[in-house]
Image (cartoon, rainbow, N blue to C red):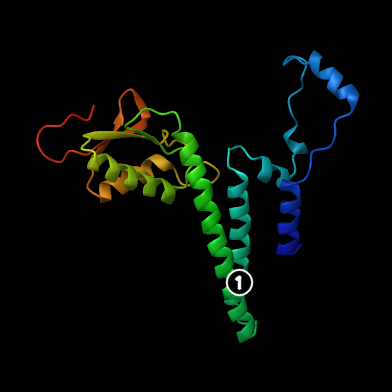
Amino acid sequence: MSINTIFQSLHNLLWRSPPSEPPQQRDQKSEYSPESSPEPDTHDISPLDEIVLGKSSDSKLRFQANLERIQMVEKFKRSRDSLQSQSDRVSAKKSAMVHKRSMESLNKQASERIFSENNKRIRPGIIDLHSLHVDEAKNYTDLAIQEATDRGEAKIRLIVGQGRHSEGGMPKLKPAIENHLKRRQIVAKSDPKNPGILIVQLVQSGESNLL
């Protein structure tokens, strides 16, 4: 199956309209109970359905960005294929760059929406980085530190999760942010009350209390 066929299948699956529900099914919903409902058979889920439905809350923007990434990788491979003519390799590289810019734009839009939603109702001094890619989380961390420093705050808290599992094949967020702060020579420690939170010290002189 060609990459274009896969791309089109994924695209159609994502935006397909759900089938209309027969009247008798709607009537039966009132009789639903967890005890009477069988466990879903995971073998009935096709690979395409699993990609679209997933186990995370990634938006359609993330899904579109991943499709662009697939196309980008394929085009870059063609641009390095010695069996292709020079003009075809140049054309493939240009196409790959177009997909790369599109992927980056879609991921940027997705990260802005995710960050905004995460921090919509959160207390001042706390930044929620859940569901962001590592590079995005680093950028938002740097921005939060700069803004907090400008306001003269002594510390901020970063919600990063405990880092026990990677999510969707992505690197673990907590150790990535810890290493990023360490390289910047910024002190950060896990909150003793919640190991999924990093307390970042912003005051570099005099007595300070991380907790």
In the image, residue 76 lies at what x, y percent? 57, 70
Q: Residue at x 42, y 39 (%)?
A: 129
Name the one closer to the observer, 88 or 111.
111
Q: Is residue 204 above or below residue 78?
A: above
Q: Residue at x 90, y 22 (%)?
A: 24
Name the one closer to the observer, 113 or 180.
113
Q: Residue furthest bottom?
A: 86
In the image, residue 134 lies at what x, y percent? 43, 48
Q: Is residue 117 above or below residue 16?
A: above
Name the one closer to the observer, 107 or 84.
107
Q: Quadrant of the C terminus?
A: top left
Q: Is residue 161 above or below residue 25?
A: below
Residue picked out by circle 1: 95
Judge from the rendering whether residue 82 lies leftward or rightward of residue 114; answer left or right.
right
The type of residue carrying mark 1 is Ser
Q: Residue at x 20, y 37 (%)?
A: 152
Quarter residue 78 falls in = bottom right
In the image, residue 193 lies at what x, y percent? 33, 22
Callout 1: few (<14), some (14-19), or many (20+) C-alpha neighbours within 10 Å?
A: some
Q: Residue at x 71, y 47 (%)?
A: 14
In the image, residue 165 lies at what x, y percent? 48, 37
Judge from the rendering whether residue 93 lies leftward or rightward of residue 41; answer left or right.
left
Q: Quadrant of the N terminus?
A: bottom right
Q: Is residue 203 above or below residue 23?
A: below
Quarter residue 91 falls in = bottom right
Task: Report if residue 166 is visible in the image.
Answer: no
Q: Residue furthest left?
A: 206
Asked which secondary structure carries label 1, the reply is: helix
Judge from the rendering whether residue 162 lies leftward or rightward of residue 11; answer left or right.
left
Judge from the rendering whether residue 114 lies leftward or rightward of residue 81; answer left or right.
left
Task: Report if residue 8 is visible in the image.
Answer: yes
